[in-house]
Image (cartoon, rainbow, N blue to C red):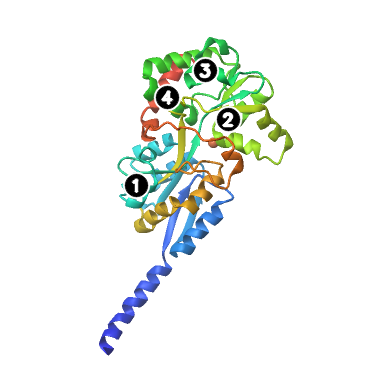
Amino acid sequence: MKRLAALCLPLFLATAAHAQEAVLNLYSSRHYQTDEALYANFTRKTGIKVNRIEANEDALLERLRNEGARSPADVLVTVDAGRLWRAEQMGLFQPVKSPVLQERIPGELRHPDGLWFAFSVRARPIFYLKGAVDPAGIRDYEDLADPKWKGAICIRSSANMYNLSLMSSMIAGDGPVKAEEWARGVVANFARSPKGGDTDQLKAVAAGECRIAVANTYYYVRLMKSARPEERAVAEKLGVIFPNQSGRGTHVNVSGAGVLKHAPHRDAAVKFLEYLSGDEAQSYFANGNNEYPVSGKVTGNRELASLGDFRRDALNVTLLGRNQAAAQQIYDRAGWK
Ligand SMILES: [Fe+2]
């Protein structure tokens, strides 16, 4: 008995010391008010401390590339399937097999080999100037190429990741030939040469510079919730159309994360991803940037919920990255700056 206790003691201490050191090193391009609660809650539940490095997406990829096998990073969190795909192409991720993640994250929102998983969804619908556009006249993205919208459309540049992913979905949906015809038709309908970000397009519609824009949902919700009355007024002038509802669904993109190939704390990393897929974390994660949880069921975000339910494109998000080079070539040939 005594000997057993003596043997057990050092083992116990070693375990306790190990638990105290439980950490997770996270590289993230997201930074929102709800993050503190998101990470604190994980630490409370698991005892694992979260060290964060936050920087913009491309800087993080560069840093990971430079650090190579010596990288202390366990998990990369970033936005846009195109960028997750780039990280995948750089060989940064390792596969994760987790029944929890497979059950909670729909198949089209994760990499087939478990290299990365989506944890929130943003849609890229069509916005229009109320009173100037009959929304019944626009059912699909394809309708934006109709010559009746000559001089009506504001949209940002083709080099932007969101538009590259949109074109990737058009290629998957319509094939490259039709997708290029579409791009030419949209360019012919431009109200102006592409400039600015998504919010600038929404403001240009409200100002009457154009009548139609394409933008991510969270930019619109941000305007709805703005403390500045003039920004709320922009949102009030706009209507939203979720296109392709009788076909493939509205184009969506994701924020996502994967476990890094050289993760020093692999188990903690998998636990963290599983935690992110839970209801409570999903609410923090999605609401931080007015995005949809992967389940599609919005909670605690009245403004986002007010946009209504819609059918999202069920294309596997990995294809948004894979079609990217073809997407840029199509835009270039179509003269979409
Ligand atoms: Fe954005």
Q: Earlier in the sequence, mark 2 or mark 1?
A: 1
Q: Amino acid at mark 4?
A: Gly
Asked whether the viewer can see residue 68, the reply is no
Which residue has dot 4 on it?
247
Percent across and percent down for residue 64 are 41, 46
Mark 3 highlights which residue?
144
User: Does mark 2's beta carbon lie closer than 8 Å to ligand 1?
Assistant: yes
**Mark 4 vs mark 3: which is more N-terminal?**
3
Q: Are marks 1 and 4 in contact (CB under 8 Å)?
A: no
Viewed as shown, does residue 236 lie left or right of 35? right
- Circle 2 sits on which residue? 198
For numbered disc 1, what is the local secondary structure? helix
Q: Amino acid at mark 3?
A: Leu
Residue at the spot of label 1: 102
| Lower position in the chain sequence, tag 4 or tag 2 | 2
Residue 87, label in figure: none
Q: How many marks?
A: 4
The spot of residue 232 in percent (x, y) is 69, 35
Percent position of residue 88, x then y: 35, 39
Mark positioned earlier in the residue sequence (2 or 3):
3
Q: Is residue 83 visible?
A: yes
Amino acid under disc 1:
Gln
Residue situated in front as seen by the camera: 69 or 185: 185
Q: Which quadrant holds residue 37?
A: bottom right
- Splitting the image into 4 quarters, where does residue 134 fall? top right
Verify CB contact (< 8 Å) between mark 4 and mark 2: no
Q: Secondary structure at mark 4?
A: loop
* Pointers 4 and 3 in contact (C-beta within 8 Å): no
Quarter containing the N terminus: bottom left
- The span from disc 3 to disc 1 (Cα, nearest Å) is 36 Å
- What is the distance, in whole Å, between disc 2 and disc 1 at their CAs? 33 Å
